[in-house]
């Protein structure tokens, strides 16, 4: 008849024996891929040339915020779902979190810091102020960059500046504060003043 101590020892041995295959049956971890070394990257941002040394995997968003210090472009989701990181590349809006900095050499990058000219707010920035088109302001740089590009997109497509059209084309820019009616009003104001 086994005593209590030997019974527990044998029971633990059984448990240990049954756990080993489960642990070793897990898929092996993939070996870590070494990062590619930094390389020279030349970017033109807001009319100014920057020479950087970046790993090829660095996103345009991280290059702007962490390597250049242009923190006006915001990081929300970092996966293309919120629009907070919207910047202009050759006049077209893109999500800076979804693209690599090395892909934009030779292009003209404009961030929220580059929209004002000679100390004067751009018409879209001014309209956002006049229409109270923000609350916390976190989404606002992306909203304004997106709205700036939208003006030319709508004209190029021959579409009208209806509220529905504006809402649809701004749907990639999320505002957690729900300032959408004022954002639409700001865009409409700039569009109507231009036409
Ligand atoms: S941070 Fe780029 S889309 Fe959200
Ligand atoms: S103003 Fe706060 S998220 Fe848009």
Image (cartoon, rainbow, N blue to C red):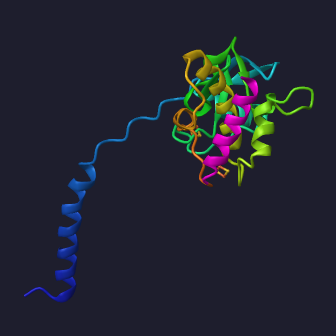
Q: Residue furthest top?
A: 106
Between 65 and 7, the one lying in front of the other is: 65
The region drawn magenta spans 178-195
Magenta region includes residue 179: yes
Between 102 and 164, the one lying in front of the other is: 164
Q: In the image, 180: left or right of 5?
A: right
Q: Magenta segment, principal secondary structure?
A: helix
Residue 158, compared with residue 176, is above or below; it is above
Residue drawn at (61%, 47%), measured in percent from left and top? Answer: 180
Quadrant the C terminus occupies: top right
Residue drawn at (80%, 33%), measured in percent from left and top? Answer: 113
Q: Residue furthest left?
A: 1
Between 137 and 21, the one lying in front of the other is: 137
Residue 74, position as x, y percentages in the image: 68, 41
Residue 119, position as x, y percentages in the image: 92, 31
Residue 63, compared with residue 82, is above or below; it is above
Residue drawn at (23%, 48%), measured in percent from left and top? Answer: 25
Residue drawn at (21%, 54%), measured in percent from left and top? Answer: 21
Residue 10, position as x, y percentages in the image: 17, 75
Magenta region includes residue 1: no
């Amino acid at each position: 008849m086994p005593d209590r101590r030997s019974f527990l020892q044998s029971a633990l041995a059984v448990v240990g024996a049954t756990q080993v295959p489960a642990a070793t049956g897990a898929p092996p971890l993939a070996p870590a891929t070494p990062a590619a070394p930094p390389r020279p990257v030349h970017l033109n941002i807001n009319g100014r040339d920057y020479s950087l040394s970046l790993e090829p995997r660095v996103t345009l968003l991280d290059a702007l915020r962490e390597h250049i210090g242009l923190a006006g472009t915001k990081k929300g989701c970092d996966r293309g779902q919120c629009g907070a990181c919207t910047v202009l590349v050759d006049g077209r809006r893109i999500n800076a979190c979804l693209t690599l900095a090395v892909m934009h050499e030779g292009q003209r990058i404009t961030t929220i810091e580059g929209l004002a000219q000679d100390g004067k707010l751009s018409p879209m920035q001014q309209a956002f102020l006049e229409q109270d088109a923000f609350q916390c302001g976190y989404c606002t740089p992306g909203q304004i960059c997106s709205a700036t590009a939208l003006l030319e997109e709508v004209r190029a497509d021959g579409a009208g500046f209806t509220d529905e059209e504006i809402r649809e084309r701004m749907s990639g820019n999320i505002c957690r504060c729900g300032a959408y009616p004022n954002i639409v009003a700001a865009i409409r104001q700039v569009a109507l003043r231009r036409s």
